[in-house]
Amino acid sequence: MNAANLAIVNDSWETIVRTKKPTKFQFELNRTSSDGHGHEMRASVLSCSYPELGEDGSVVAVSGTLTDITHLKWAERLQKQRTDEAVEAKRQHEAFIDMTCHEIR
């Protein structure tokens, strides 16, 4: 886990202990996944952590789950890429129309 992701986990842990409330956070692992088309991406997980409180109200344990959300991150990345391509195609089309109109005048 790189330093940025380790900081996310540490900050979330401190939040759980301080607020004594459930916390959700996402981070990346060192493991990579492939989409089968030669593209690789670091695996992403969603953590849902729940503090268990003792009789005095202090956190005595934390339990939680890790859910692999790599496929969702792939979809987000693909959607952003396609949106960026569509915006660029529209910009180029408008530039072509502007140039053509200018030449016709």
Image (tube, rainbow, N blue to C red):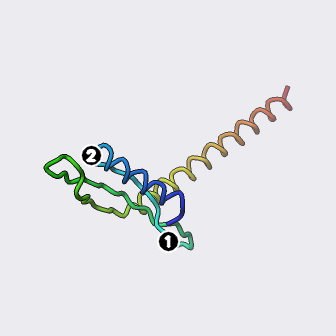
Q: Which circle marks residue 56 in the picture?
A: none
In the rendered structure, the answer to whether residue 30 lies left or right of residue 69 reads right
Which secondary structure lies at badge 2? loop
Q: Residue at x 62, y 49 (%)?
A: 85
In the foreground, 59 or 98 = 59
Q: Quadrant of residue 100?
A: top right
Distance from disc 2 to disc 1, alpha carbons, whole Å, reads 33 Å
Residue positioned most to the left = 55
Instruction: Point out the residue furthest to the front here.
Output: 56
Name the kind of residue labelled 2 in the image. Lys
Label 1 sits on what residue type? Thr
Q: Residues within 10 Å of mark 2 (few under 14, many from 20)?
A: some
Residue carrying label 1:
32
Residue 37 lies, with reference to residue 50, above or below; the image says below
**Where is residue 35 drawn, in percent x and y?**
49, 70
Residue 56 position, x and y percent, is 17, 47
Q: Which of disc 1 and disc 2 is earlier in sequence? A: 2
The residue positioned 60% from the left and 47% from the top of the image is 84
Q: How many labels sit on residues?
A: 2
**20 is higher (above) or lower (below) than 29:** above
Lateral position of residue 56 relative to residue 81, left or right:
left
Q: Nearer the viewer, residue 96 or 69?
A: 69
Q: Residue at x 53, y 57 (%)?
A: 4
> Alpha-carbon neighbours of circle 1 within 10 Å: few (<14), some, or many (≥20)?
few
Question: Where in the figure is residue 27, as x and y percent of width and height?
Answer: 44, 58
Residue in front for this viewpoint, 54 or 86: 54
Percent across and percent down for residue 83 are 56, 47
Q: Nearer the viewer, mark 2 or mark 1?
A: 2
Instruction: Name the residue carrying label 2.
Output: 20
Q: Secondary structure at mark 1?
A: strand
Residue plotted at (34% across, 50% down): 24
